Protein backbone atom coordinates (compact mmCIF):
# COMPACT_ATOMS: atom_id res chain seq x y z
CA UNK A 1 0.00 0.00 0.00
CA UNK A 2 1.32 3.42 -0.95
CA UNK A 3 0.79 6.76 0.75
CA UNK A 4 1.71 8.78 -2.31
CA UNK A 5 0.35 8.78 -5.88
CA UNK A 6 1.47 10.82 -8.86
CA UNK A 7 -1.33 11.08 -11.43
CA UNK A 8 -1.12 12.84 -14.81
CA UNK A 9 -4.38 14.25 -16.14
CA UNK A 10 -4.31 14.37 -19.94
CA UNK A 11 -6.87 16.84 -21.29
CA UNK A 12 -6.72 15.81 -24.94
CA UNK A 13 -8.59 16.35 -28.17
CA UNK A 14 -9.80 13.25 -29.97
CA UNK A 15 -11.02 12.27 -33.44
CA UNK A 16 -14.18 10.19 -33.55
CA UNK A 17 -13.47 6.90 -35.27
CA UNK A 18 -9.68 7.39 -35.52
CA UNK A 19 -8.90 4.58 -33.11
CA UNK A 20 -5.27 4.18 -34.13
CA UNK A 21 -4.63 7.93 -34.11
CA UNK A 22 -6.23 8.38 -30.70
CA UNK A 23 -4.17 5.47 -29.35
CA UNK A 24 -0.93 6.99 -30.67
CA UNK A 25 -1.75 10.30 -29.00
CA UNK A 26 -2.39 8.56 -25.68
CA UNK A 27 0.82 6.56 -25.85
CA UNK A 28 2.78 9.74 -26.63
CA UNK A 29 1.17 11.40 -23.61
CA UNK A 30 2.13 8.36 -21.54
CA UNK A 31 5.78 8.88 -22.45
CA UNK A 32 5.55 12.44 -21.19
CA UNK A 33 3.90 11.19 -18.00
CA UNK A 34 6.77 8.72 -17.59
CA UNK A 35 9.22 11.64 -17.76
CA UNK A 36 7.18 13.30 -15.00
CA UNK A 37 7.53 10.09 -12.94
CA UNK A 38 3.76 9.56 -12.86
CA UNK A 39 2.27 6.35 -11.48
CA UNK A 40 -0.78 6.68 -13.70
CA UNK A 41 -2.11 8.75 -16.59
CA UNK A 42 -5.83 9.35 -17.04
CA UNK A 43 -7.64 10.18 -20.30
CA UNK A 44 -11.13 11.60 -20.99
CA UNK A 45 -14.31 9.67 -21.70
CA UNK A 46 -14.17 7.36 -24.75
CA UNK A 47 -10.75 8.75 -25.64
CA UNK A 48 -9.99 5.66 -27.70
CA UNK A 49 -12.93 5.89 -30.12
CA UNK A 50 -13.94 9.55 -29.70
CA UNK A 51 -17.01 11.09 -28.09
CA UNK A 52 -19.83 11.26 -28.96
CA UNK A 53 -19.58 8.34 -31.40
CA UNK A 54 -23.35 8.28 -32.10
CA UNK A 55 -24.33 5.29 -34.27
CA UNK A 56 -20.74 4.44 -35.13
CA UNK A 57 -20.78 2.24 -32.03
CA UNK A 58 -23.42 0.08 -33.71
CA UNK A 59 -20.78 -1.10 -36.19
CA UNK A 60 -19.30 -4.41 -34.99
CA UNK A 61 -16.09 -3.64 -36.87
CA UNK A 62 -15.50 -0.53 -34.76
CA UNK A 63 -16.07 -2.42 -31.52
CA UNK A 64 -13.71 -5.18 -32.60
CA UNK A 65 -11.01 -2.75 -33.68
CA UNK A 66 -11.28 -0.80 -30.42
CA UNK A 67 -10.89 -4.00 -28.39
CA UNK A 68 -7.79 -5.01 -30.35
CA UNK A 69 -6.25 -1.54 -30.00
CA UNK A 70 -6.91 -1.50 -26.26
CA UNK A 71 -5.09 -4.81 -25.85
CA UNK A 72 -2.17 -3.47 -27.85
CA UNK A 73 -2.03 -0.38 -25.64
CA UNK A 74 -2.12 -2.56 -22.57
CA UNK A 75 0.98 -4.44 -23.78
CA UNK A 76 2.90 -1.16 -23.70
CA UNK A 77 2.42 -0.95 -19.93
CA UNK A 78 4.55 -4.06 -19.42
CA UNK A 79 7.58 -1.74 -19.39
CA UNK A 80 6.90 -0.70 -15.81
CA UNK A 81 5.93 2.87 -16.75
CA UNK A 82 2.70 4.64 -15.85
CA UNK A 83 -0.55 2.73 -15.78
CA UNK A 84 -3.29 4.08 -18.05
CA UNK A 85 -6.98 4.73 -17.46
CA UNK A 86 -8.58 4.65 -20.91
CA UNK A 87 -12.21 5.32 -21.85
CA UNK A 88 -13.68 3.17 -24.61
CA UNK A 89 -16.62 0.92 -25.50
CA UNK A 90 -16.95 -2.64 -24.24
CA UNK A 91 -19.20 -5.62 -24.93
CA UNK A 92 -20.17 -7.81 -21.99
CA UNK A 93 -22.78 -10.57 -22.18
CA UNK A 94 -23.94 -9.23 -25.51
CA UNK A 95 -24.48 -5.70 -24.14
CA UNK A 96 -22.63 -2.58 -25.25
CA UNK A 97 -21.21 -0.37 -22.49
CA UNK A 98 -19.52 3.00 -22.16
CA UNK A 99 -16.62 2.23 -19.86
CA UNK A 100 -13.10 2.75 -18.57
CA UNK A 101 -10.21 0.29 -18.40
CA UNK A 102 -7.12 0.19 -16.19
CA UNK A 103 -4.13 -0.83 -18.28
CA UNK A 104 -1.16 -1.93 -16.21
CA UNK A 105 1.54 -4.59 -16.13
CA UNK A 106 0.93 -5.45 -19.75
CA UNK A 107 -2.77 -6.25 -19.54
CA UNK A 108 -6.29 -4.86 -19.28
CA UNK A 109 -6.43 -5.30 -15.53
CA UNK A 110 -9.85 -3.95 -14.56
CA UNK A 111 -12.89 -2.45 -16.33
CA UNK A 112 -15.76 -0.38 -14.99
CA UNK A 113 -18.94 0.71 -16.81
CA UNK A 114 -20.93 3.94 -16.82
CA UNK A 115 -24.04 3.56 -14.69
CA UNK A 116 -26.02 6.76 -15.37
CA UNK A 117 -26.66 7.16 -19.10
CA UNK A 118 -27.69 10.69 -20.15
CA UNK A 119 -30.77 10.83 -22.35
CA UNK A 120 -31.60 14.51 -22.72
CA UNK A 121 -30.58 17.46 -24.86
CA UNK A 122 -27.64 16.43 -27.02
CA UNK A 123 -27.29 13.04 -25.33
CA UNK A 124 -28.98 9.82 -26.39
CA UNK A 125 -26.80 7.18 -24.75
CA UNK A 126 -29.80 5.11 -23.67
CA UNK A 127 -30.43 4.06 -27.28
CA UNK A 128 -26.80 2.99 -27.70
CA UNK A 129 -25.60 1.54 -24.40
CA UNK A 130 -26.72 -0.56 -21.51
CA UNK A 131 -26.11 0.92 -18.06
CA UNK A 132 -23.49 -0.83 -16.01
CA UNK A 133 -24.13 -1.91 -12.43
CA UNK A 134 -23.31 0.47 -9.62
CA UNK A 135 -19.51 0.31 -9.86
CA UNK A 136 -17.11 -0.73 -7.18
CA UNK A 137 -13.67 0.87 -6.80
CA UNK A 138 -10.61 -0.49 -8.55
CA UNK A 139 -7.48 -1.25 -6.57
CA UNK A 140 -4.25 0.39 -7.73
CA UNK A 141 -1.06 0.18 -5.64
CA UNK A 142 -3.24 -0.72 -2.69
CA UNK A 143 -5.43 2.39 -3.11
CA UNK A 144 -9.18 2.12 -3.65
CA UNK A 145 -10.04 4.42 -6.57
CA UNK A 146 -13.59 5.18 -7.68
CA UNK A 147 -14.15 5.74 -11.40
CA UNK A 148 -17.45 7.51 -12.02
CA UNK A 149 -17.93 8.40 -15.67
CA UNK A 150 -19.31 11.83 -16.60
CA UNK A 151 -23.09 11.65 -15.93
CA UNK A 152 -22.38 9.40 -12.93
CA UNK A 153 -21.41 12.40 -10.79
CA UNK A 154 -24.50 14.41 -11.72
CA UNK A 155 -26.50 12.02 -9.55
CA UNK A 156 -25.53 11.22 -5.94
CA UNK A 157 -25.97 7.44 -6.01
CA UNK A 158 -22.80 6.40 -7.85
CA UNK A 159 -20.35 8.41 -5.76
CA UNK A 160 -22.16 7.40 -2.55
CA UNK A 161 -21.97 3.73 -3.58
CA UNK A 162 -18.25 4.05 -4.35
CA UNK A 163 -17.61 5.70 -0.98
CA UNK A 164 -19.61 3.00 0.82
CA UNK A 165 -17.46 0.35 -0.87
CA UNK A 166 -14.25 1.95 0.31
CA UNK A 167 -13.22 4.41 -2.42
CA UNK A 168 -10.49 6.73 -1.16
CA UNK A 169 -10.44 9.11 -4.11
CA UNK A 170 -12.50 9.66 -7.27
CA UNK A 171 -11.22 10.04 -10.83
CA UNK A 172 -14.05 11.13 -13.11
CA UNK A 173 -13.54 11.06 -16.88
CA UNK A 174 -15.81 13.22 -19.01
CA UNK A 175 -17.03 14.16 -22.44
CA UNK A 176 -18.90 17.25 -21.25
CA UNK A 177 -19.86 19.67 -24.05
CA UNK A 178 -19.50 23.40 -23.61
CA UNK A 179 -22.50 25.49 -22.70
CA UNK A 180 -22.51 29.06 -21.46
CA UNK A 181 -21.72 29.14 -17.70
CA UNK A 182 -21.34 25.37 -17.56
CA UNK A 183 -17.88 25.46 -15.97
CA UNK A 184 -19.36 27.07 -12.85
CA UNK A 185 -22.11 24.45 -12.77
CA UNK A 186 -19.59 21.62 -13.06
CA UNK A 187 -17.38 22.86 -10.23
CA UNK A 188 -19.76 24.46 -7.75
CA UNK A 189 -22.99 22.71 -8.61
CA UNK A 190 -21.76 19.15 -9.01
CA UNK A 191 -18.13 18.24 -8.30
CA UNK A 192 -17.68 20.12 -5.02
CA UNK A 193 -21.00 18.78 -3.80
CA UNK A 194 -20.00 15.18 -4.51
CA UNK A 195 -16.58 15.67 -2.93
CA UNK A 196 -17.94 17.24 0.24
CA UNK A 197 -20.88 14.86 0.56
CA UNK A 198 -18.54 11.87 0.49
CA UNK A 199 -15.44 13.43 2.01
CA UNK A 200 -13.38 12.32 -1.01
CA UNK A 201 -11.15 14.28 -3.38
CA UNK A 202 -12.40 14.27 -6.98
CA UNK A 203 -10.48 14.83 -10.21
CA UNK A 204 -12.72 15.94 -13.09
CA UNK A 205 -11.04 15.33 -16.47
CA UNK A 206 -12.79 16.65 -19.58
CA UNK A 207 -11.94 16.38 -23.26
CA UNK A 208 -11.29 19.38 -25.48
CA UNK A 209 -12.08 20.03 -29.15
CA UNK A 210 -14.91 20.17 -31.66
CA UNK A 211 -17.14 17.38 -32.90
CA UNK A 212 -19.75 18.43 -35.46
CA UNK A 213 -22.15 20.71 -33.55
CA UNK A 214 -20.59 20.10 -30.14
CA UNK A 215 -17.46 21.63 -28.72
CA UNK A 216 -15.64 20.61 -25.54
CA UNK A 217 -13.83 23.21 -23.49
CA UNK A 218 -11.61 21.06 -21.28
CA UNK A 219 -11.32 23.16 -18.10
CA UNK A 220 -10.49 20.05 -16.05
CA UNK A 221 -9.93 20.41 -12.31
CA UNK A 222 -9.41 18.71 -8.96
CA UNK A 223 -11.34 19.43 -5.78
CA UNK A 224 -10.45 18.03 -2.38
CA UNK A 225 -12.85 16.44 0.08
CA UNK A 226 -13.37 19.76 1.86
CA UNK A 227 -14.54 21.37 -1.38
CA UNK A 228 -11.38 23.40 -1.96
CA UNK A 229 -10.08 23.74 -5.50
CA UNK A 230 -6.64 22.11 -5.74
CA UNK A 231 -6.00 22.25 -9.51
CA UNK A 232 -7.62 24.14 -12.36
CA UNK A 233 -6.48 23.29 -15.87
CA UNK A 234 -6.82 25.66 -18.80
CA UNK A 235 -9.78 25.74 -21.15
CA UNK A 236 -9.86 25.54 -24.97
CA UNK A 237 -6.42 23.94 -25.23
CA UNK A 238 -4.93 20.50 -24.84
CA UNK A 239 -3.02 20.23 -21.58
CA UNK A 240 -1.36 17.69 -19.34
CA UNK A 241 -0.95 18.30 -15.63
CA UNK A 242 0.81 16.00 -13.20
CA UNK A 243 -0.90 16.02 -9.81
CA UNK A 244 0.43 14.79 -6.46
CA UNK A 245 -1.78 12.94 -4.02
CA UNK A 246 -1.00 12.12 -0.39
CA UNK A 247 -2.64 9.92 2.20
CA UNK A 248 -3.23 11.99 5.35
CA UNK A 249 -4.70 11.22 8.73
CA UNK A 250 -8.11 12.28 7.42
CA UNK A 251 -7.86 10.63 4.00
CA UNK A 252 -6.36 11.30 0.60
CA UNK A 253 -5.68 14.83 -0.56
CA UNK A 254 -4.40 16.39 -3.79
CA UNK A 255 -1.55 18.87 -3.36
CA UNK A 256 -2.24 22.44 -4.39
CA UNK A 257 -1.26 22.93 -8.01
CA UNK A 258 -1.67 25.51 -10.72
CA UNK A 259 -4.97 27.39 -10.93
CA UNK A 260 -5.30 28.48 -14.54
CA UNK A 261 -7.72 31.32 -15.33
CA UNK A 262 -10.70 30.38 -17.49
CA UNK A 263 -11.96 32.49 -20.37
CA UNK A 264 -14.42 35.16 -19.27
CA UNK A 265 -17.67 35.91 -21.05
CA UNK A 266 -17.93 36.50 -24.03
CA UNK A 267 -14.42 35.20 -24.80
CA UNK A 268 -15.65 31.70 -23.95
CA UNK A 269 -18.35 31.93 -26.62
CA UNK A 270 -15.86 33.19 -29.17
CA UNK A 271 -13.37 30.43 -28.36
CA UNK A 272 -16.15 27.85 -28.71
CA UNK A 273 -16.87 29.12 -32.21
CA UNK A 274 -13.20 29.17 -33.18
CA UNK A 275 -12.37 25.68 -31.90
CA UNK A 276 -15.53 24.10 -33.33
CA UNK A 277 -14.92 25.57 -36.79
CA UNK A 278 -11.22 24.66 -36.77
CA UNK A 279 -11.81 21.00 -36.00
CA UNK A 280 -14.76 20.76 -38.39
CA UNK A 281 -12.82 22.19 -41.33
CA UNK A 282 -9.57 20.37 -40.68
CA UNK A 283 -11.07 16.97 -39.92
CA UNK A 284 -13.26 17.09 -42.98
CA UNK A 285 -10.13 17.98 -44.97
CA UNK A 286 -11.20 21.29 -46.46
CA UNK A 287 -8.33 23.57 -47.55
CA UNK A 288 -10.13 26.57 -46.07
CA UNK A 289 -13.42 28.43 -46.17
CA UNK A 290 -15.20 30.89 -48.42
CA UNK A 291 -17.96 33.26 -47.36
CA UNK A 292 -19.91 36.25 -48.57
CA UNK A 293 -18.71 39.48 -46.93
CA UNK A 294 -21.55 41.98 -47.06
CA UNK A 295 -20.34 44.88 -44.95
CA UNK A 296 -22.65 43.74 -42.15
CA UNK A 297 -21.76 42.50 -38.70
CA UNK A 298 -22.71 38.82 -39.12
CA UNK A 299 -20.45 38.13 -42.07
CA UNK A 300 -17.67 40.28 -40.59
CA UNK A 301 -17.52 38.33 -37.34
CA UNK A 302 -17.74 35.03 -39.24
CA UNK A 303 -14.73 36.07 -41.29
CA UNK A 304 -12.88 36.94 -38.08
CA UNK A 305 -13.82 33.62 -36.47
CA UNK A 306 -12.59 31.80 -39.58
CA UNK A 307 -9.29 33.69 -39.55
CA UNK A 308 -8.78 32.91 -35.87
CA UNK A 309 -9.66 29.27 -36.47
CA UNK A 310 -7.65 28.62 -39.64
CA UNK A 311 -5.39 31.59 -40.25
CA UNK A 312 -6.29 34.49 -42.60
CA UNK A 313 -4.55 32.78 -45.52
CA UNK A 314 -7.24 30.05 -45.52
CA UNK A 315 -10.17 32.49 -45.63
CA UNK A 316 -11.67 33.74 -48.91
CA UNK A 317 -14.17 36.59 -48.60
CA UNK A 318 -16.34 37.62 -51.51
CA UNK A 319 -18.42 40.77 -51.81
CA UNK A 320 -21.45 40.13 -54.06
CA UNK A 321 -23.02 43.55 -54.62
CA UNK A 322 -26.35 44.20 -56.27
CA UNK A 323 -27.83 47.52 -57.36
CA UNK A 324 -29.16 47.89 -53.80
CA UNK A 325 -25.73 47.56 -52.18
CA UNK A 326 -24.59 50.86 -50.75
CA UNK A 327 -21.15 52.35 -51.20
CA UNK A 328 -20.83 52.22 -47.41
CA UNK A 329 -21.24 48.45 -47.50
CA UNK A 330 -18.60 48.15 -50.22
CA UNK A 331 -16.17 50.31 -48.25
CA UNK A 332 -16.79 48.53 -44.94
CA UNK A 333 -16.38 45.08 -46.48
CA UNK A 334 -13.13 46.12 -48.16
CA UNK A 335 -11.77 47.56 -44.92
CA UNK A 336 -12.86 44.50 -42.95
CA UNK A 337 -11.07 42.09 -45.32
CA UNK A 338 -7.95 44.25 -45.15
CA UNK A 339 -8.00 44.29 -41.33
CA UNK A 340 -8.40 40.53 -41.17
CA UNK A 341 -5.80 39.94 -43.87
CA UNK A 342 -7.83 37.42 -45.87
CA UNK A 343 -8.24 36.97 -49.61
CA UNK A 344 -10.94 39.30 -50.93
CA UNK A 345 -12.67 39.90 -54.22
CA UNK A 346 -15.83 41.49 -55.58
CA UNK A 347 -18.25 39.70 -57.92
CA UNK A 348 -21.29 41.86 -58.87
CA UNK A 349 -24.49 39.86 -59.21
CA UNK A 350 -26.37 42.33 -61.44
CA UNK A 351 -25.78 40.31 -64.64
CA UNK A 352 -27.35 37.24 -63.06
CA UNK A 353 -30.23 39.26 -61.57
CA UNK A 354 -31.01 40.73 -65.00
CA UNK A 355 -30.85 37.29 -66.57
CA UNK A 356 -33.34 35.93 -64.04
CA UNK A 357 -35.60 38.95 -64.53
CA UNK A 358 -35.65 38.29 -68.26
CA UNK A 359 -36.02 34.53 -67.85
CA UNK A 360 -39.03 34.94 -65.54
CA UNK A 361 -40.56 37.97 -67.24
CA UNK A 362 -43.27 35.98 -68.96
CA UNK A 363 -44.25 33.93 -65.95
CA UNK A 364 -44.13 36.97 -63.61
CA UNK A 365 -45.70 39.39 -66.09
CA UNK A 366 -48.94 39.94 -64.16
CA UNK A 367 -47.43 39.68 -60.64
CA UNK A 368 -46.27 42.47 -58.38
CA UNK A 369 -42.63 42.69 -57.34
CA UNK A 370 -42.32 41.29 -53.81
CA UNK A 371 -40.04 39.25 -51.59
CA UNK A 372 -39.61 36.73 -54.41
CA UNK A 373 -37.24 39.06 -56.24
CA UNK A 374 -35.32 39.66 -53.00
CA UNK A 375 -34.89 35.93 -52.51
CA UNK A 376 -33.65 35.50 -56.09
CA UNK A 377 -30.76 37.84 -55.23
CA UNK A 378 -29.89 35.79 -52.18
CA UNK A 379 -30.04 32.55 -54.14
CA UNK A 380 -27.81 33.98 -56.86
CA UNK A 381 -25.25 34.77 -54.17
CA UNK A 382 -25.56 31.24 -52.83
CA UNK A 383 -25.04 29.71 -56.27
CA UNK A 384 -22.00 31.94 -56.86
CA UNK A 385 -20.35 31.06 -53.57
CA UNK A 386 -21.08 27.36 -54.03
CA UNK A 387 -19.49 27.56 -57.48
CA UNK A 388 -16.30 28.89 -55.89
CA UNK A 389 -16.48 26.14 -53.29
CA UNK A 390 -16.94 23.45 -55.95
CA UNK A 391 -14.22 24.81 -58.20
CA UNK A 392 -11.50 25.45 -55.63
CA UNK A 393 -12.45 23.37 -52.60
CA UNK A 394 -13.03 25.73 -49.66
CA UNK A 395 -16.10 25.00 -47.56
CA UNK A 396 -18.84 27.63 -47.76
CA UNK A 397 -19.68 29.28 -44.46
CA UNK A 398 -23.16 30.63 -43.87
CA UNK A 399 -23.45 33.63 -41.60
CA UNK A 400 -27.04 33.87 -40.31
CA UNK A 401 -27.54 34.28 -36.56
CA UNK A 402 -29.98 32.48 -34.28
CA UNK A 403 -32.37 35.45 -34.10
CA UNK A 404 -32.82 35.36 -37.86
CA UNK A 405 -33.04 31.58 -38.01
CA UNK A 406 -35.65 31.59 -35.25
CA UNK A 407 -38.08 33.74 -37.19
CA UNK A 408 -37.21 32.54 -40.67
CA UNK A 409 -35.38 35.67 -41.82
CA UNK A 410 -33.09 33.64 -44.02
CA UNK A 411 -33.44 32.41 -47.59
CA UNK A 412 -33.52 28.69 -48.08
CA UNK A 413 -31.11 27.72 -50.91
CA UNK A 414 -29.73 31.27 -50.64
CA UNK A 415 -27.89 32.64 -47.62
CA UNK A 416 -28.63 29.31 -45.88
CA UNK A 417 -26.60 27.39 -48.47
CA UNK A 418 -23.30 26.16 -47.09
CA UNK A 419 -21.45 23.61 -45.03
CA UNK A 420 -21.25 25.19 -41.58
CA UNK A 421 -22.54 28.19 -39.65
CA UNK A 422 -20.48 29.55 -36.71
CA UNK A 423 -23.41 31.77 -35.59
CA UNK A 424 -26.14 29.14 -35.71
CA UNK A 425 -26.68 29.23 -31.93
CA UNK A 426 -25.76 32.90 -31.37
CA UNK A 427 -28.52 35.47 -30.95
CA UNK A 428 -28.00 38.88 -32.52
CA UNK A 429 -27.11 40.55 -29.22
CA UNK A 430 -24.46 37.87 -28.73
CA UNK A 431 -23.10 38.73 -32.17
CA UNK A 432 -22.76 42.37 -31.10
CA UNK A 433 -21.06 41.34 -27.85
CA UNK A 434 -18.46 39.05 -29.42
CA UNK A 435 -17.76 41.56 -32.21
CA UNK A 436 -17.08 44.33 -29.71
CA UNK A 437 -14.93 41.95 -27.65
CA UNK A 438 -12.90 40.70 -30.63
CA UNK A 439 -12.18 44.24 -31.77
CA UNK A 440 -10.45 44.84 -28.41
CA UNK A 441 -8.93 41.40 -27.75
CA UNK A 442 -7.42 38.41 -29.48
CA UNK A 443 -8.43 34.96 -28.18
CA UNK A 444 -5.64 32.81 -26.78
CA UNK A 445 -6.33 30.15 -29.41
CA UNK A 446 -6.67 32.64 -32.28
CA UNK A 447 -4.57 32.60 -35.45
CA UNK A 448 -5.90 35.91 -36.78
CA UNK A 449 -4.60 39.47 -36.47
CA UNK A 450 -3.66 40.99 -33.13
CA UNK A 451 -5.70 44.16 -33.59
CA UNK A 452 -9.30 44.98 -34.53
CA UNK A 453 -10.95 42.78 -37.15
CA UNK A 454 -13.69 45.08 -38.44
CA UNK A 455 -14.37 48.79 -38.79
CA UNK A 456 -16.39 50.23 -35.92
CA UNK A 457 -18.99 51.30 -38.46
CA UNK A 458 -19.92 47.66 -39.07
CA UNK A 459 -20.86 47.29 -35.40
CA UNK A 460 -22.79 50.55 -35.12
CA UNK A 461 -24.70 50.65 -38.41
CA UNK A 462 -28.37 49.46 -38.45
CA UNK A 463 -28.57 45.86 -39.73
CA UNK A 464 -29.93 45.47 -43.27
CA UNK A 465 -30.14 42.72 -45.88
CA UNK A 466 -29.95 45.40 -48.64
CA UNK A 467 -32.31 43.51 -50.93
CA UNK A 468 -34.52 46.53 -51.62
CA UNK A 469 -34.07 50.31 -51.34
CA UNK A 470 -33.44 51.65 -47.80
CA UNK A 471 -34.19 48.27 -46.20
CA UNK A 472 -33.62 47.83 -42.45
CA UNK A 473 -34.15 44.69 -40.36
CA UNK A 474 -36.28 46.66 -37.88
CA UNK A 475 -38.75 47.52 -40.66
CA UNK A 476 -40.30 44.09 -40.10
CA UNK A 477 -38.83 42.90 -36.78
CA UNK A 478 -38.80 44.40 -33.31
CA UNK A 479 -35.43 45.78 -32.12
CA UNK A 480 -33.03 42.90 -31.62
CA UNK A 481 -32.78 43.49 -27.89
CA UNK A 482 -36.55 42.97 -27.65
CA UNK A 483 -36.61 40.14 -30.18
CA UNK A 484 -33.85 38.24 -28.40
CA UNK A 485 -35.64 38.60 -25.07
CA UNK A 486 -38.79 37.10 -26.57
CA UNK A 487 -36.85 34.30 -28.27
CA UNK A 488 -34.98 33.41 -25.10
CA UNK A 489 -38.34 32.95 -23.45
CA UNK A 490 -39.90 30.95 -26.28
CA UNK A 491 -36.90 28.81 -27.26
CA UNK A 492 -34.65 28.40 -24.23
CA UNK A 493 -37.33 28.46 -21.53
CA UNK A 494 -40.46 27.22 -23.35
CA UNK A 495 -42.54 30.10 -22.00
CA UNK A 496 -46.03 30.84 -23.24
CA UNK A 497 -47.31 34.05 -24.79
CA UNK A 498 -49.15 34.82 -21.54
CA UNK A 499 -46.00 34.41 -19.47
CA UNK A 500 -43.96 36.70 -21.71
CA UNK A 501 -46.73 39.27 -21.83
CA UNK A 502 -46.81 39.22 -18.02
CA UNK A 503 -43.07 39.94 -18.07
CA UNK A 504 -43.71 43.15 -20.00
CA UNK A 505 -43.39 42.18 -23.66
CA UNK A 506 -46.07 43.43 -26.05
CA UNK A 507 -48.54 40.59 -26.43
CA UNK A 508 -49.23 41.09 -30.14
CA UNK A 509 -45.51 41.11 -30.84
CA UNK A 510 -44.99 37.89 -28.90
CA UNK A 511 -47.87 36.21 -30.78
CA UNK A 512 -46.31 37.23 -34.09
CA UNK A 513 -42.84 36.02 -33.12
CA UNK A 514 -44.20 32.69 -31.87
CA UNK A 515 -45.99 32.25 -35.20
CA UNK A 516 -42.82 33.00 -37.16
CA UNK A 517 -40.83 30.63 -34.94
CA UNK A 518 -43.19 27.77 -35.73
CA UNK A 519 -43.42 28.53 -39.44
CA UNK A 520 -39.63 28.51 -39.85
CA UNK A 521 -39.10 24.98 -38.51
CA UNK A 522 -38.93 23.52 -42.03
CA UNK A 523 -36.14 25.94 -42.92
CA UNK A 524 -34.11 25.09 -39.84
CA UNK A 525 -34.27 21.40 -40.70
CA UNK A 526 -32.36 22.24 -43.89
CA UNK A 527 -29.81 24.55 -42.29
CA UNK A 528 -26.13 23.58 -42.06
CA UNK A 529 -24.65 22.48 -38.74
CA UNK A 530 -23.22 24.99 -36.29
CA UNK A 531 -21.70 24.97 -32.83
CA UNK A 532 -23.96 24.60 -29.79
CA UNK A 533 -23.55 27.47 -27.32
CA UNK A 534 -26.65 27.55 -25.12
CA UNK A 535 -29.00 25.07 -23.53
CA UNK A 536 -31.43 24.72 -26.47
CA UNK A 537 -29.79 24.79 -29.86
CA UNK A 538 -31.86 24.06 -32.95
CA UNK A 539 -31.52 20.47 -34.04
CA UNK A 540 -29.82 18.50 -31.27
CA UNK A 541 -31.69 20.02 -28.32
CA UNK A 542 -34.93 21.47 -29.65
CA UNK A 543 -36.69 18.84 -31.75
CA UNK A 544 -40.05 20.19 -32.83
CA UNK A 545 -42.33 18.72 -35.50
CA UNK A 546 -42.48 20.69 -38.71
CA UNK A 547 -46.22 20.10 -39.02
CA UNK A 548 -48.27 20.94 -35.95
CA UNK A 549 -51.10 23.28 -34.97
CA UNK A 550 -50.37 24.11 -31.33
CA UNK A 551 -49.97 27.75 -30.37
CA UNK A 552 -49.63 28.99 -26.79
CA UNK A 553 -52.07 31.86 -27.40
Image (spheres, rainbow, N blue to C red):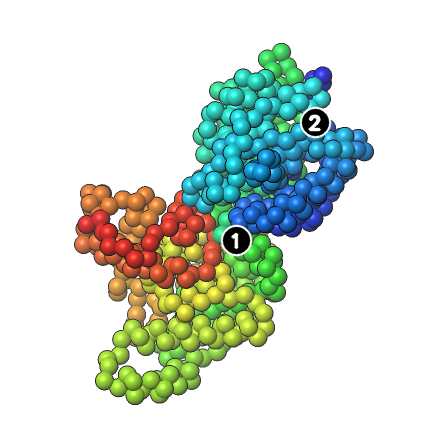
User: In this orientation, which residue lies closer to the viewer: 485 or 542?
Assistant: 542
Q: Is residue 150 above or below residue 449?
A: above
At numbered mark 1, what does the secondary structure look like: helix, strand or loop? loop
Disc 2 crowd rating (10 Å Cα; few below 14, some 14-19, many 20+) is some
**Camera sees residue 297:** no
**Relative image position of residue 478 (x, y in whole percent):** 26, 57
Residue at 31% over, 64% down: 473
Residue at 46% over, 28% down: 155
CA gap between label 1 and label 2 equals: 35 Å
Total numbered labels: 2
Say which residue label 2 marks.
6
Q: Residue furthest right?
A: 79
Give the side of residue 493 with respect to residue 211, left or right. left
User: In this orientation, which residue lies closer to the viewer: 314 or 101?
Assistant: 101
Where is residue 407, by image quadrant?
A: bottom left
Say which residue label 1 marks.
212
**Relative image position of residue 525 (x, y in whole percent):** 39, 59
Amino acid sequence: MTDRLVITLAQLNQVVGDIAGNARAMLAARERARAAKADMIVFPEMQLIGYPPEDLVLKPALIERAAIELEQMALETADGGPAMLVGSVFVRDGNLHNGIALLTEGKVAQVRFKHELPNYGTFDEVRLFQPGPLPEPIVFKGVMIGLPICEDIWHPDVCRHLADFGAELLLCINGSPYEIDKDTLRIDGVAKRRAVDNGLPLAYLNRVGGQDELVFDGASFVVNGDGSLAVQMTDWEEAEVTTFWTRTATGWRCDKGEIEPLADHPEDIYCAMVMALRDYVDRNRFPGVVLGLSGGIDSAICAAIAADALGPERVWAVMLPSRFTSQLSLDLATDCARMIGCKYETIPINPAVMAFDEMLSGTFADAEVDITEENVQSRIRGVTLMAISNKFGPMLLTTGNKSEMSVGYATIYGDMAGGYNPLKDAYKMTVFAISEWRNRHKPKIGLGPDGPVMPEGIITRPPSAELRPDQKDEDSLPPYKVLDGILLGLVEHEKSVDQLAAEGFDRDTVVRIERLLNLAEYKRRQAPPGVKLGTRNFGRDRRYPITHSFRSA
